[in-house]
Amino acid sequence: MAEDTLRIKEIYRSIQGESSFSGQPCAFVRTVGCDLRCSYCDEPHAFSGGERMSIDEVLDHVMALAVPLVELTGGEPLLQPALPVLCQRLLDEGFQVLIETGGHRDISSIDPRVHVILDLKTPASGMSQHNDFANLERLSSAGEIKFVVADSADYAWARDRIREHVLERRWPVHLSPVHGVLDPRELAAWMLRDGLRARLNLQLHKYVWGPDAEQV
């Protein structure tokens, strides 16, 4: 049954490339399917394929990787009805659990102990109209916000949302330049110019293994 299984694209061990956990060894569970089509998406291979796995099978794979930090990602992991149960099982086994979600689906079903990375979509993604800002009231203190920035208009939009919702006083906030599109030096200069209380977030794995490497 769908409530007991998830569509999984891949499960692997690597270095966490983004977020406050950047640089740490991490087990990644990538689910299949996404209901957004961001212009800068770097995981289109997760839109389809994969296999259906039971929660027990996912747990067995994760435990075999022997890494205490686990990230559930996609695609869009919140499309999987069994995800809240998987989170609870992982937490019960002593794992620290991260979820990266697009910010457009209700996160209230997720255990508040899970560290949710809310990826609010900027205008250049073509998907900003889908942001559910009510999630800012659902996000626990164990969470953070990410904006992927493609150009100066994206940056201005993210800056204004940070200030409008006083995000920097509530969670860690990351600004991530689209790799190969926006020079990180430009984004850093804008942040310094505006005195923005946020973190420049580079995709570490792309600098270590290259932008086209998979399962990293």
Image (cartoon, helix red, strand yellow):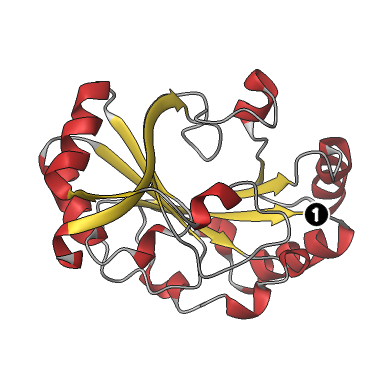
Where disc 1 sits, the SS reads loop
Q: Is residue 203 above or below residue 175?
A: above
Say whether residue 54 is left or right of residue 122: left
Say whether residue 198 is left or right of residue 51: right
Looking at the image, can residue 13 be seen? yes
Q: Residue at x 72, y 54 (%)?
A: 40
Q: Residue at x 86, y 65 (%)?
A: 153
Q: Residue at x 42, y 55 (%)?
A: 32
Kind of residue indicated by mark 1: Ala
In the image, residue 204 lies at what x, y percent? 62, 28
Q: Is residue 72 above or below residue 121?
A: above
Q: Is residue 24 above or below residue 185?
A: above
Say whether residue 49 is left or right of residue 61: right
Report the label total.
1
Q: Quadrant of the N terminus?
A: bottom left
Quadrant hosting residue 150: bottom right
In the image, residue 142 lies at what x, y percent? 35, 51
Q: Nearer the viewer, residue 72 or 187?
A: 72
Quadrant hosting residue 141: bottom left
Q: Nearer the viewer, residue 58 or 21?
A: 58
Looking at the image, can residue 29 be seen? no
The crowd level at tag 1 (other Cα within 10 Å; few <14, some 14-19, many 20+) is: many
User: Which residue in the structure is indicated by mark 1?
Assistant: 150
